[in-house]
Image (cartoon, rainbow, N blue to C red):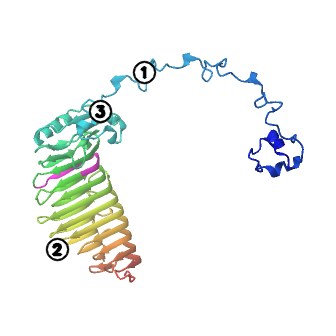
Amino acid sequence: GLPADKVIRAFGANRYGTAAALSDLLSSIDGVEYDPAYLPITDTAADSDLLDGLDSTAFLRTTAKAADSDLLDGLDSTAFLRTTAKAADANLLDGLDSTAFRKVSDPVDAATLGGLSLGALDLRYAAAVERVIPVAASGSAASNGSALRTAYDGVVGATADAPYVILLGPGTFDLGAARLDLQDNVHIVGSGRSATVVTGDGADAITNNAGLLGGADVELRHLTLVATGGENVTGVRNFGGDLRLRDVRLDVTVGAVETFGLEVVDGSIDLHDVEITLDGGIAIDLDAAGVDVIATLTDVSIHGSSTLSELWGIRADIRAAGPSVEIDAHGLDIELTTQFNAWGVALLDGVEFAGRDVSIAVDGGGTGFQRGFVVNGTLTGSPSRAEIQGLRSTGPDVAVSIASTSEAHEVIVRGGYLAGPVNMASTATGRLALSYLESTTTPAFVGPGGPAGSIDCFGIHDTSYLVISCP
């Protein structure tokens, strides 16, 4: 309601004479030139020379600097390096000079050996990377094998705290007829299972005799081993040592009647991501002659096919009462095909078998018998025991069986699929316990007499999901 000249003079209102957006808030002025709650546009507040209640003496001019402007965090320039300067120990890394490190252009350079970096070795002892001996496949397979043998046999003074690594490049290394005897704490690492191949045509391609020398700790990694010898050839033999295989393929397909993929006597093996192929004999043979044998099998596959010989996936036994064989298998896959006798897993005396996710397929027909998982030891006082979580076993003659008639063996299976007869010798005094699995046949006692032992079932059904009752 004010005259336009008063509104414009007091508040700088809309110069086109329309009502201001805040006109409803200012209507109480009612003829007064301006409200004391507002400043005219030409006036200043009483404290306009202050900022946050402070006068200009509390602030620096744009061209001035603080009294401590030459300091950073209270420190003067002597505490800092110039951009063009370097520290007194700039030539050191972790207190070590250049003599403690390899140049990337040294023979251990990853590019020289097929892209395998030292950091990928991941051996039990990190110190191993400080003692790496590279061997490149630069010539014929025979000359490469000779270079491997020279490098390996030339290692002196390897210990558990100072192990050595023979690092093989891509290619084939032929050891010839003379086997390579493994040394304690001298490991062999290839450039990959499909890249590095070590062959041998002797009775034993590679042998770990270090147990006779006071104990061994040896690892083979990232390579393929091929045994090309004749009858009774063995791919890897481990006497009394501690042998580890990581990412390894072992091929023993020599067209002979009796062969061994991996033979262990009085020692331990640790297999991880290992594939064994054979055409006769035993893929893994574990034998405790005087010392406990410990076998750790993780993601291990065994493939056997033969028209000449019987086949065994795993055979475990003791030679005399006292020692034992302990097997821990997680992710075990066995496939055997032959017209002769075949055993997927055969536990004789004194064996403790703990399995998870075990698959056994044995077939072939012919005149022989094919058995999946069998316990059949007869040594007095040395029963075997197997406990498996998840077993898939197929065998025309036997899927699971306790065949011994003189020892109280025990087999416990929880979960899985059994295709083939499931039985226990009537005179056996042991126990067969099955639960939560599917079976194509009803578990039964076989043979005359008895039953002396027991077959226990819980949650067993056939392929039509009808409940199976055990005898």
User: 361 or 35, which is in the foreground?
Assistant: 35
Q: Position of residue 165 (x, y in %)?
A: 27, 37
User: 350 or 398, which is in the foreground?
Assistant: 398
- Residue 152 sits in quarter: top left
Q: Secondary structure at mark 3?
A: loop
Q: How would you rate the neighbour count of disc 3 (Cα within 10 Å): few for under 14, some for 14-19, many for 20 or more?
A: some
Q: Which mark is residue 90?
A: 1
- Given this view, does label 3 or label 2 mark the residue nearer the observer? 3
Question: Relative to residue 190, is residue 440 depicted above or below?
Answer: below
Q: Which mark is residue 131?
A: 3
Residue type indicated by callout 3:
Arg
Sequence-earlier tag: 1 or 2: 1
Question: Relative to residue 119, is residue 454 depicted above or below?
Answer: below
Whether the residues at callouts 3 and 2 have beta carbons within 8 Å, the answer is: no
Sequence-earlier tag: 1 or 3: 1
User: Magenta span covers which residues?
Assistant: 231-248
Q: Position of residue 397 (x, y in %)?
A: 23, 75
Q: Which residue is mark 2?
A: 365
- Given this view, does label 1 or label 3 mark the residue nearer the observer? 1
User: 13 or 144, which is in the foreground?
Assistant: 13
Q: Position of residue 197 (x, y in %)?
A: 18, 47
Residue type indicated by callout 2:
Gly
Residue 350, visible in the rendered structure: no
- Viewport quadrant of the C terminus: bottom left
Residue type indicated by callout 1:
Ala
Left or right: residue 205 compared with residue 93: left
